Image (tube, helix red, strand yellow):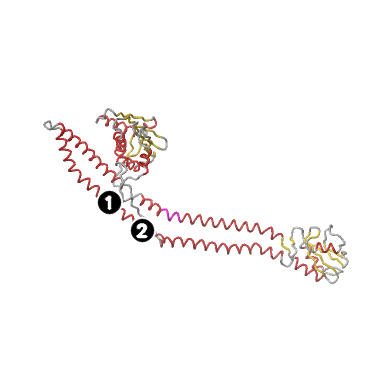
Amino acid sequence: MKSLGKYISKYLASFAGLVLILLFINCLAFAWTFYGVVTKDYGGFSPQNMLEAAAESASLEGISDEISGQLKTNHIWAVYLDMEGDRVWDVDAPDEIPERFTVQDVAVFAKGYLAGYPVFIRNTDDGMLVLGYPQDSYMKLPSNYYSLRSIKTFPFFVMGILAADLAILFLAYYYSKRKILKNAEPIITSIVTLGNGRPASLSMHGELSGIADSVNKASAILSRQNQARANWISGVSHDIRTPLSMIMGYAERIAHENSADSHIRREAEIIRQQSVKIRELVQDLNLVSSLEYEMQPIHKIPVSLAGLLRSYTAELLNTGLPGKYSINIGITPAAETVLFDCDARLISRAVGNLVQNSISHNPDGCDIALALDCTDESISLSVSDNGIGLSTEKLKELNEKPHYMESTDDRLDLRHGLGLILVRQITDAHSGTMKIESEDQKGCKAILNFPIDGGN
């Protein structure tokens, strides 16, 4: 956790540094953007400065040529009024500016505008100097004046700076997220692998190396546990085979001993049949264990699933299917020629387990159907029957309640036999999915879907 904290702190510090840099850049951008506006609108030719310069040279006789030239250059007009409000002289005054003003007129335009022009006044010893600026140059308030250029520029500046800041922060977030996900993806993958009960190996450097070491340590412990469990299952299975073979041999001999009592022969036959089931259960246990811990080699070759189903069905009928059961095959034209990269022995085993599941759950008999279909993307193989089916509760339990071999709970709660677990593991080994559909008294259907390229 300490390494993860350092990793997160590093990115938080980088983000905080980026924010500070953006604030600094924003200040520079503000200064650069408004420097020209301030120097021009509030510099040497600003209303205040021009008013002072013009008032110093203004009199009833006129104004200096230098000041007059500056006024014309900056598109500023001037009017000089005497004490009675009459215009004495002007510099480029617009036609709409009257020749005479009353005290009331002066009081009105002195606060802001004259004929739409922002004006600025200064009293002199002989009269009043009025400077008028272009109509779109300044906005006047009772206590101050502001450059319209500045006011118009400011919203665009704010929007531009905000857009640039958001873009930079988004890019920083995007690339940080990509880098974090890139660094975290191996960790997440390893954790998911460990969660599925399989060992994982993780190699990382820097701040996250501690997490990688922890994952590898957990993986090593899990590998030892899996190996120990697999070895235990394999050892127990091996130890069972010899006494089980002897039991089966003696039971078969007794069952065929003509001198033995008929009741004893029947019981011996029951012992033999149950011993066969135990042997098959041990085989299933070994195969489930091998697939669970990836100790079972998968030999994939292109296989015609249509031919595989026909071969299985023929073998089942030849070995003697009880008369109360029937089996049919339905293969679509598209599935007749499809080849699937798979382990034919395991796929045949999965089909056999599903068929035997239908037989064992329907002691009074049923019709069993094998179906094969395919599309451009996937192959669908199903085994269905019209038997007693499963209740809603049983189906939910079958799909949701973990088998004792898959459960991490100390209480080993057996959900069902190994048959369906083996089918599911064989399906997983071929990148497929398994789905069970059933209704009470309406049969059961198991559907195996395999991607066309799942065996590659």
Q: Is residue 181 magenta?
A: yes
Amino acid bearing label 2: Ser
Reading the image, the residue beneath label 2 is 214
Tell me which corner region of the image, top left, top right, bottom left or bottom right, holds residue 181: bottom left
Q: Quick one: label 1 or label 2, which is nearer the N terminus?
A: 2
Reading the image, the residue beneath label 1 is 227
Crowd around label 2: few <14 · some 14–19 · many ≥20 (10 Å): few
Percent position of residue 241, x then y: 20, 43
Check disc 1 and report its element: helix, strand or loop. Answer: helix
Residue 132 visible to an observer of this rendering = yes
Percent position of residue 273, x then y: 21, 36
Return the residue nearer the eye: 431 or 253. 253
Percent position of residue 42, x then y: 71, 66
The quadrant the N terminus occupies is bottom left
Crowd around label 1: few <14 · some 14–19 · many ≥20 (10 Å): some
Q: Which residues are magenta?
A: 180-185
